[in-house]
């Protein structure tokens, strides 16, 4: 263990040590052997040394970790969350397009619009006192692991305060002032995978003179009333946008290159007629607020319904066959006024190969006289509009690009780990990741929604909460068991990815379609998805497999590996007045099960 790392650790231990050594308090055998072991010997078992954590991004993930710290679940952790945008919210600060297709039960309606989701996140930050941990308008531009310090050096630059900062490797717009460096013991990348958005790769895009909008950077005050609009893309976002702008626009040209399933609503039996949205009344919301047990039961029923649908993602299952038949029937019925649309839109690939999209009102919108579908590719942009591959020109006022994100998972800023290994270079080739949270050669580094997360099944928020609990267990172990660093064993992410890809081959996601899950390629590897249901994922996160990791002790001698057992007492025993039950080992016993005396 390098001397500098030991000195840093001793400083942390001294902050929680009493100033003077009491008689019999320390293990004197360690006094001349190892300074760290001697310091720990004065502490009760479980006393946490100080750690500094830096988190990238203040969306759902970053705020979930901040709440873990704020609740006191990680005592003696100093946290800074750096957020490149002007406020918290992450994806839902940036994605303001009209529409939502996942039932989320914390809002004003069954399918919440982006504005309600962002308002909720802001309320979470305020009500849980999380903003004190967050520095907005600061962008992480690099990180390097310093082996001799057992710390990360993180490079940060302030922005000019603009509302939205683009997240990719090349764009430096909005960066202001001189970069500065901070050190931390633990680095968490909570930057997410839904904010490195992609413009369409169509020639001469810059020549268009009208308004151009990307769905992932939707302006606050978009005026589409009476406009002629081109909508590029029929993935989940484009499907949500069309019915939500139809009433305002004069005309919409919808450019469709790929077939897609427009499916039944998620947990449809809880939605409105035919899967329509439900707007909760003030009476309903008040009743739930006054009866939290009923509200919890409602939430559980919705989540249970979402969980029960995972079987359809197995491409040879009865559930998949039923979904195929039902979806075909529903789409055909909703497109009955224009059956020629169904002939070109209904796919041959499995339901779920592309992200399943309820698309409330989308098929009906395609049949509207306001809508004209342009099938196939786009040749180029020009000053007044778009030239389709079939030679047809359409002049428009506004172009909406619902063209998705870069889902390569390779980080947007350089991250250099052990022995100079670049995570960017490594993951550009193949993003091997263990449980979507840790990576080889990257000590004390954790990721939210990395490669292999359950993006394809239900809302990700519950997954983020489970990842938070998982990461917290590692941080606590580093704090209380005298370790300076932890990293997956070199073969673990590779072996885990092999298992994942082998399992995913039998799923609907592996069908022949261009999807977000394959970063837009029909034959791309399914590196983005977890090999199982989200309940399967949650179970794996409950109890970390410590044997899959290499741990570096702050004591050099192997025989001092148990120095963290400390002074022979636990923390609560050393308090004048404990607030926990120190007789927890005596469980309550029902009267009927009590052993009756026989003497």
Image (tube, rainbow, N blue to C red):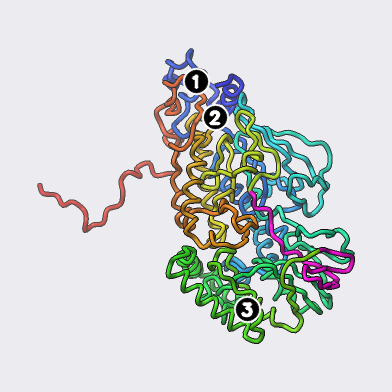
84 to the left or right of 49: right
Q: Secondary structure at mark 1?
A: loop
Between 536 and 595, the residue placed more toward the observer is 536
Give the mark toward the camera: 2 or 3: 3
Within-10-Å neighbours for mark 3: few <14, some 14–19, many 20+: some
Between 12 and 105, the residue placed more toward the observer is 105
Q: Residue at x 63, y 41 (%)?
A: 79
Sequence-first disc among 3 and 1: 3
Q: Residue at x 72, y 45 (%)?
A: 135
x and y, in percent, of residue 598 in the image: 11, 49
Q: Is residue 403 magenta?
A: yes
Q: Residue at x 27, y 53 (%)?
A: 589
Question: Which residue is labeled 3 in the image?
Answer: 342
x and y, in percent, of residue 52 in the image: 62, 36
For the N terminus, the quadrant is top right
Within-10-Å neighbours for mark 2: few <14, some 14–19, many 20+: many
> Disc 2 versus disc 1: distance between alpha carbons?
11 Å
Could you tell me if residue 282 is visible in this image?
no
> Disc 3 versus disc 1: distance between alpha carbons?
69 Å
Between 398 and 494, the residue placed more toward the observer is 494
Q: Secondary structure at mark 3?
A: helix
Q: Residue furthest bottom?
A: 337
Question: Which residue is labeled 2 in the image?
Answer: 484
Q: Is residue 597 above or below residue 121?
A: above
Please state the extent of the stretch shown in magenta in the rendering: 380-408
Res 556 label: 1
434 to the left or right of 560: right
Within-10-Å neighbours for mark 1: few <14, some 14–19, many 20+: some
Q: Residue at x 47, y 58 (%)?
A: 506
x and y, in percent, of residue 438 in the image: 55, 42
Between 72 and 468, the residue placed more toward the observer is 468
Whether residues under marks 2 and 3 lie with C-beta atoms below 8 angstroms apart, the answer is no
């Amino acid at each position: 263990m390098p001397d500098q790392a030991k000195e840093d650790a001793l400083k942390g231990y001294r902050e929680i040590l009493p100033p003077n050594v009491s008689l019999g308090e320390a293990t004197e055998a360690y006094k001349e052997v190892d300074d760290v072991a001697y310091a720990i010997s004065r502490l009760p078992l479980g006393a946490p040394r100080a750690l500094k954590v830096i988190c990238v991004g203040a969306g759902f993930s970053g705020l979930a970790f901040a709440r873990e710290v704020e609740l006191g679940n990680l005592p003696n952790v100093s946290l800074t969350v750096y957020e490149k945008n002007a406020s918290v919210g992450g994806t839902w600060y940036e994605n303001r397009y009209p529409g939502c297709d996942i039932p989320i039960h914390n809002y004003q309606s069954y399918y919440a619009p982006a504005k309600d989701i962002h308002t909720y996140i802001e309320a979470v930050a305020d009500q849980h006192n999380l903003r004190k941990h967050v520095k907005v308008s600061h962008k992480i531009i690099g990180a390097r692991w310093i082996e001799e310090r057992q710390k990360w050096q993180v490079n940060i630059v302030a922005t000019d305060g603009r509302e939205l900062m683009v997240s990719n490797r090349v764009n430096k717009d909005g960066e202001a002032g001189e970069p500065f460096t901070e050190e931390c013991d633990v680095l968490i990348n909570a930057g997410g995978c839904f904010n490195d958005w992609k413009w369409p790769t169509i020639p001469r895009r810059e020549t268009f003179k009208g308004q151009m909008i990307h769905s992932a950077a939707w302006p606050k005050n978009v005026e589409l009333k009476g406009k002629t609009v081109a909508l590029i893309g029929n993935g989940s976002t484009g499907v949500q946008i069309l019915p939500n702008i139809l009433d305002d626009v004069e005309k919409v040209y919808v450019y469709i290159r790929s077939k897609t399933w427009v499916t039944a609503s998620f947990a449809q039996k809880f939605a409105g007629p035919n899967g329509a949205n439900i707007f909760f009344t003030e009476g309903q919301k008040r009743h739930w607020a006054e009866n939290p047990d009923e509200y919890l039961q409602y939430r559980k029923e919705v989540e249970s319904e979402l969980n029960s649908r995972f079987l359809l993602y197995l491409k040879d299952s009865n559930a998949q066959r039923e979904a195929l038949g039902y979806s075909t029937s529903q789409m055909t019925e909703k497109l009955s006024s224009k059956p020629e649309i169904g002939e070109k839109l209904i796919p041959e690939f499995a339901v779920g190969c592309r992200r399943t999209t309820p698309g409330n009102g989308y098929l009906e919108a395609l049949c509207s006289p306001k809508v004209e579908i342009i099938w196939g590719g786009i040749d180029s942009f020009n000053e007044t509009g778009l030239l389709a591959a079939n030679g047809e020109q359409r002049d428009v006022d506004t172009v909406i690009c619902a063209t998705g994100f870069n889902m390569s998972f390779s980080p947007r800023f350089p991250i250099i780990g052990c022995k100079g290994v670049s995570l960017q270079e490594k993951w550009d080739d193949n993003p091997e990741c263990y449980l979507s949270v840790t990576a080889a050669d990257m000590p004390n580094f954790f990721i939210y929604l990395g490669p292999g997360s359950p993006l394809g099944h239900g809302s990700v928020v519950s997954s983020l909460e489970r990842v938070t609990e998982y990461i917290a267990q590692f941080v606590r172990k580093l704090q209380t068991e005298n370790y300076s660093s932890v990293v997956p064993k070199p073969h673990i992410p590779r072996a885990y990815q092999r298992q994942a890809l082998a399992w995913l081959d039998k799923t609907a996601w592996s069908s022949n379609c261009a999807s977000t899950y394959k970063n837009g390629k029909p034959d791309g590897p399914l590196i983005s998805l977890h090999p199982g249901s989200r309940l399967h994922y949650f179970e794996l996160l409950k109890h970390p497999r410590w044997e899959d990791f290499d741990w570096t002790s702050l004591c050099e001698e192997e025989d001092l590996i148990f120095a963290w057992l400390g002074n022979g007492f636990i923390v609560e025993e050393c308090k004048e007045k404990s607030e926990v039950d120190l007789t927890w080992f005596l469980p309550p016993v029902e009267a009927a099960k009590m052993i009756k005396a026989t003497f």
